[in-house]
Image (cartoon, grey):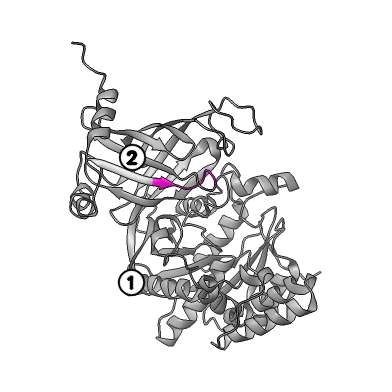
């Protein structure tokens, strides 16, 4: 009798194998995370092949499909794509890349794994089309093979372990916060001499991760990763981390709740304090990108109350407008009754009072799961917070920034007139060097655009307490 090919044999065993239980995930997964064979945490790369069996939503963007682009996905449409799975330690989830769809770092649901079995749910195919991956480890292949199924799509996948690529001098570390740890990347320059200065990056708004990327935005920017590596070439060490709810820390957010600004500030406070207490660096500079600068400033003010100080704060592409004022401006297009209702709800949130259920037009914005975030966000005053920082402050504005207006940036100058303020030529909101409007938008999702050399030179000079180089210019009000 002719023997079955290894992949078919494994798929047959998978279909006959008992389901994965919670007890198995708790015991075997713990050991598998330390194993060198079997399913273990790390990067797994391979392929996904699925085929549409019934009429429904259009085929996923990217990959290969039989239906013409933009047409409804008929029965028989198919997708073949390269995929990469970043399997985190047990209980911390996993992130999925599908480069053909410009999808990177997509956080997965219902991730379970042992040394021999893996399952997770991918919810980006549309309503009611969660794609369930279930696979089994084939020792002869050192790979996971299995099925991928949703209501309309069915197929298979294969994943093999791959060595994670790290930039020279980079290593992943976990840093302590209030309720455990947050993951980050420490970059120590390979210059042959110990780095005496450390830059701590705080990424921007929303679910922006340590590298400056956001899974909600197609493609990658890699702005903070590129900036950290450029500083390393100048013998400056850096640390960047995934904020709570982003990147590899996505499971640190409470289910169904938006992470509040206060939580981010508390995390940053503890992270910076940890590096101060380590005594490993003679100079520590905090660099915040847009909302990250708000977080950094508030964290430094909390540390100052405990007599902990750093050597400087850099705020890049940051607005001084109060969120409360932004909200009021955004409501101006609504009817007067809705504006009054929103104002009443806002006042109730800020004073910890209850309020009636919002009108349908306001219900999503004032949803109960958003209230903790709204309270800390609406009550924040960035100009006031940065004015209180008791360390050297450098404000940086990009000449090509289309998101932060000069007027919004100048509110920070009004609050802290003695701060150094510089313009970086050709730099946009995501810290990329661009010339045209087309390049400006494209750079948000394309890592090929470099960070400006002028920005790197300016940061390096500030870290070393040297005069600003001539490649950037003093900010002058128009």
- Which residue is denoted by mark 1 in the rendering? 179
Circle 2 residues within 10 Å: few <14, some 14–19, many ≥20: many
Residue at 70%, 52% in the rendered image: 426
Front position among marks 1 and 2 = 2
* Label 1 vs 2, first from the N-terminus: 2
Under tag 1, what secondary structure?
loop
Q: Is residue 123 magenta?
A: yes
Tell me if residue 383 comes above or below residue 27 in the rendering. below
- Which residue is denoted by mark 2 in the rendering? 134
Q: On the picture, is 56 further left or further right than 31?
A: right
Tell me if residue 365 comes above or below residue 1 in the rendering. below
* Residue 166, visible in the rendered structure: no
Q: CA distance from mark 1 to mark 2?
A: 31 Å
From which residue to which does the magenta span run? Answer: 121-126
* Residue 225, visible in the rendered structure: yes
Tell me if residue 477 comes above or below residue 160 in the rendering. below
């Amino acid at each position: 009798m002719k023997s079955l090919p290894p992949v078919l044999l494994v798929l047959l065993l998978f279909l006959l194998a008992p389901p994965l239980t919670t007890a198995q995930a708790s015991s075997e997964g713990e050991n598998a995370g330390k194993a060198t064979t079997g399913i273990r945490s790390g990067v797994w790369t391979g392929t996904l092949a699925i085929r549409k069996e019934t009429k429904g939503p259009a085929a996923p963007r990217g990959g290969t499909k039989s239906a013409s682009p933009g047409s409804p996905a008929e029965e028989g449409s198919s997708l073949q794509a390269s995929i990469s799975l970043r399997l985190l330690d047990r209980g911390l989830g996993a992130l999925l890349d599908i480069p053909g769809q410009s999808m990177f770092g997509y956080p997965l649901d219902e991730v379970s794994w042992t040394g021999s079995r893996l399952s997770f749910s991918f919810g980006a195919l549309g309503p009611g089309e969660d794609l369930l991956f279930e696979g089994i480890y084939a020792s002869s292949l050192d790979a996971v093979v299995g099925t991928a199924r949703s209501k309309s799509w069915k197929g298979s996948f294969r994943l093999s372990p791959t060595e994670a690529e790290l930039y020279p001098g980079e290593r992943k570390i976990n840093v302590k916060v209030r309720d455990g740890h947050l993951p980050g990347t420490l970059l120590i320059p390979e210059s042959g001499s110990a780095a005496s200065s450390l830059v701590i990056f705080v990424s921007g708004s929303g679910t922006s991760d340590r590298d400056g990327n956001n899974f909600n935005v197609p493609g990658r920017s890699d702005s903070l990763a590129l900036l950290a590596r450029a500083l390393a070439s100048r013998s400056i060490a850096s640390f960047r981390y995934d904020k709570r709810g982003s990147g590899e820390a996505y499971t640190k957010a409470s289910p169904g709740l938006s992470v509040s600004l206060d939580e981010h500030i508390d995390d940053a406070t503890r992270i910076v304090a940890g590096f101060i207490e380590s005594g490993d660096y003679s100079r520590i500079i905090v660099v915040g990108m847009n909302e990250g600068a708000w977080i950094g400033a508030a964290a430094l003010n909390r540390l100052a109350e405990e007599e902990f100080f750093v050597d400087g704060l850099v705020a890049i592409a940051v607005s001084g407008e109060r969120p409360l004022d932004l909200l009021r401006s955004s409501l101006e297009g609504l009817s007067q009754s809705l504006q009054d209702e929103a104002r009443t709800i806002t006042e109730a949130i800020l004073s910890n009072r209850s309020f009636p259920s919002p009108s349908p037009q306001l219900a999503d914005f004032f949803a109960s799961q958003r209230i903790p975030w709204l309270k800390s966000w609406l009550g924040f005053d960035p100009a006031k917070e940065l004015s209180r920082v008791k360390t050297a402050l450098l404000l940086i504005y990009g000449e090509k920034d289309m998101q932060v207006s000069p007027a919004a940036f100048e509110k920070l100058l009004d609050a802290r007139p003695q701060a150094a303020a510089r313009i970086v030529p050709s730099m946009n909101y995501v810290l990329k060097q661009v010339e045209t409007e087309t390049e400006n938008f494209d750079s948000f999702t394309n890592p090929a655009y470099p960070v400006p050399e002028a920005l790197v030179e300016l940061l390096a000079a500030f870290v070393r307490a040297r005069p600003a180089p001539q490649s950037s210019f003093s900010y002058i009000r128009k």
